[in-house]
Amino acid sequence: MSNVLFILTGSIACYKACEVISQLVQRGHHVRPVASAAALRFVGATTLEALTHEKVRTDLWAEGEALDHINLDRWADVTVVCPATANTLNALAAGLADNLVGSLLLAHDPHKPLLVAPAMNPAMWKHPATVAASRRLRSWGVQFIEPAAGRTACGEVGEGRLAEPETIVAAIDAALVRPEHRLRVLVTSGGTSEPIDGVRVLTNISTGATGAGIAEHFSRLGHDVLLVRAATSVPLSAPGREETYGSFGDLDAVLERRLREEHFDVVIHAAAVSDYAIEAIEVDGQTWRPGAGKIPSQATPLIRLRRNPKLLDKLRSCSLNPAIRVVAFKLTKEADDAAMRAAVEAILAHGTADYVVQNDLAQREPDGAFPADIWGPQRTIVAHCRDRADIALALATLLS
């Protein structure tokens, strides 16, 4: 079976974590336990050793174990933090590594699944610090086993109870499943930049974070992924296949070459492609070649634009795979429901995409969370996504 690195932190819910460990061992998994000092106030090291037949690691500085924060992660097929306290979530999101638990999580291989099962008082779970930490961790690919609602050990009622052992074990098993059919996926991300002169460009506000997150999620699931991203956009957080572009013309050339050279099963076209390129520039009555030199700061240039063709329209025709599936993205701004639906249906009716991820700029939250809906071939919403991590999870489910 699989190697499971199981990390316990200081919560009364450690007693339920012992049941999770027991079930994992009974299913044939090899479990190595790590416990924080606080966790050992709730459950003894002897219990964990008896359940796993493994020594319990607790100390970053233990003699002969100086590299355990590296070696244990490399050994594991999956890492589980159960229970994960509010302190642990906030420390992990801040990148703190002053103990064995923090060092293990900071040294985690992002190509492997990392699951956290929160357990805490409902007010702590809803606190802005914990909410922000959870969103940040999700954006890094951490998978949450959502806490349950009900009466907590302190007597208060609300969301924060550790999920039931059966739920946690099922989530671990699901994370360990490798795809029966390994997809070859091309993801685009970032925004195009059309040169005005040698130092100025016409571009957009895309960061490429959504596309990079999707690429990393599919890679963690075992799929073969190529990320085609803008040179200034968010890169992959771990080594992987990627190629960069600058302008619309660069992206067009990269996509055509890659689709003609390699067999892809899916294109997830998350790049923000400019609708316009620079046609001509006039400076003080003289023609200025786009991308050349630097227009004097005191000048008043006249810039003429031309419409770019839609790259979405040619993805299938360029592909070696006539059955390639295409996911398009549609960003609106302050649109009502009717306008959003019309924008999505225009893409689906054209037959250039199988799914459309639609979000509206006005719904973007201050901490960067960006809700979205995924529309399917029947022109209905097939998934509501609260943030980028949810988009990646939903697309992986729909396309696998």
Image: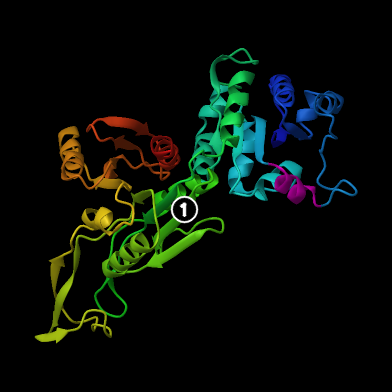
Q: Is 75 colored magenta in this rendering?
A: yes
Q: Quadrant of residue 386?
A: top left
- SS class, disc 1: strand
Q: Is residue 173 visible?
A: yes
| Residue drawn at point x = 33 percent, y = 55 percent | 271
Q: Quadrant of residue 32?
A: top right
> Which residue occupies 85% across, 24% down?
50
Q: Is residue 347 above or below residue 194?
A: above
Q: In the rendered structure, which segment of residues is drawn in magenta?
A: 67-76
Q: Which residue lies most toward the left here? A: 285
What residue appears at the point 54 percent right and 36 percent down from the top-left corner? 143
Q: Is residue 223 magenta?
A: no
Image location (x, y in percent) of residue 161: 59, 20
Secondary structure mainly formed by the magenta segment: helix
Amino acid tagged 1: Val
Measured as percent of width and height from the top left, residue 121 is found at: 59, 22
Q: Position of residue 62 (x, y in %)?
A: 87, 46
* Left or right position of 382 against 387: left
Q: Which residue is mark 1?
A: 225
Q: Quadrant of residue 229?
A: bottom left
Tell me if residue 164 can be seen. Answer: no
In the image, what residue occupies the spot 67% across and 45% down? 105
Between 130 and 51, the one nearer to me in the picture = 51
> In the picture, which quadrant includes the N terminus?
top right
Q: Quadrant of the C terminus?
A: top left
